[in-house]
Amino acid sequence: MPQTLASGIAYADLKFEERANIIAACFLQDASGVAIVDPGPSSCLPALEDALRQRGGSIDDVHTVLLTHIHLDHAGAAGSLVRRNARIHVFVHEVGAPHMIDPSRFLNSARRLYGDAMGALFGEFVPVPAANVTSLSGGETIPLASRRLEVAYTPGHASHHVTYFDPESRIAFVGDTAGIRQGQSGFVLPPLAPPDINLELWEASIARILEWEPKTIFLTHFGPYDDVRPHFAELQENFAVTSRIVKDTLAATATDGERAATFAQKVMQLMRSRMPAADADAYALAGPLEHNWIGLARYWRKKEGAARSA
Ligand SMILES: [Zn+2]
């Protein structure tokens, strides 16, 4: 059953991989229908439809899809939804928009990361017709009946990441910019999959989100949190912790595969020291820990390469 966040705003668990609390989608109801923030992957469409049905509606009532970014676990179902209801309008950052219209290059690079598991994990990725797409650059206001959502460009996790803010409820829909948080531990894991990880840009995006002074941040992985500043402080602390582990692996003699495995093992150890094992496993389900090594190592290698050649 969808959970209410504020008047006209709710979220549902998309039961990714039959697990609770891995991927959430948000619903913003108004007189003309429903806007969905991050509809999730196509593999979760049955759960998304169930949630709409429990709210007394269906895909026919959806008029808008607001994507925080185009990663499969957030945006994968957008094209499938538009195929079912051509009235749906998809908002997405201008860097991501071309890939929603022609996903071939983006899907090839995702396949390098996920291999043969990609289809089973995320399902189909249907292109969105260009006529259904509106590109955002940040700074816009999106009118949805009586509601006006503000948009900020928030790169760092992805170069095509935006955050939506509802000034009335003071909820910020932060996608992956506020990391992954599960259970009661308060541990906030940065999702660090390649190829766009940039910690400086990410820090600036956090500052931008805090300018709104949100009452609540809503994380795709997973749910609403009101302790906004301590939450981001914990995320920033874990930028440092994960960076230290990555730098240690880069200094050691090993293959990248071995380095990624060492990183995954150390982060898992750290999480298991802070929470029950089932919670720690849930963090890894929202994004394989080895991918975090690939993304963060790419960032540090580029940065230190640039420093050396300067
Ligand atoms: Zn994600």
Image (cartoon, rainbow, N blue to C red):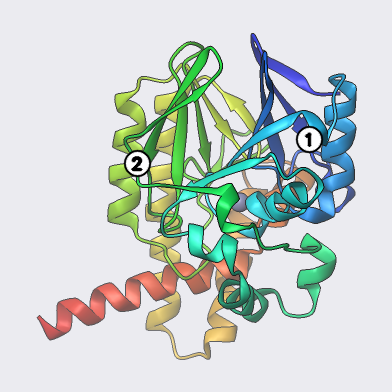
Rate crowding at label 1 as few (under 14), some (14 to 19) or many (20 or more) other CA atoms within 10 Å: many
Q: Secondary structure at mark 2?
A: loop
Say left or right for 219 vs 41. left
Residue 229 placement: quadrant: top left
* Ligand 1 lies under 8 Å from the Cβ of mark 2: no
Question: Does the rendering let one see residue 266?
Answer: no
Say left or right for 57 vs 184. right
Rate crowding at label 2 as few (under 14), some (14 to 19) or many (20 or more) other CA atoms within 10 Å: some
Which residue is nearer to you in this view: 179 or 145?
145
Which residue is nearer to you in this view: 133 or 51?
133
Q: Which residue is mark 2?
A: 138
Which residue is nearer to you in this view: 107 or 85?
85
Q: Which residue is mark 1?
A: 13
Between marks 1 and 2 in the image, the one whose residue lies nearer the viewer: 2
Q: Secondary structure at mark 1?
A: strand
Which residue is rendered at x = 89% and y = 27% of the image? 53
Which residue is rendered at x = 80% and y = 73% of the image? 117
Question: Does the rendering let one see residue 268?
Answer: yes
Q: Amino acid at mark 2?
A: Gly
Q: Amino acid at mark 1?
A: Asp
Q: Is residue 14 above or below residue 303?
A: above
Kindly report the distance in space between the C-alpha atoms of the residues bearing marks 1 and 2: 28 Å
> How far from the left and from the top, in percent, is residue 80?
77, 53
Q: Is residue 220 above or below residue 298?
A: above
The image shows a total of numbered marks equal to: 2
* Ligand 1 lies under 8 Å from the Cβ of mark 1: no
Q: Which mark is residue 257?
A: none
Furthest toward the left, the residue is 310
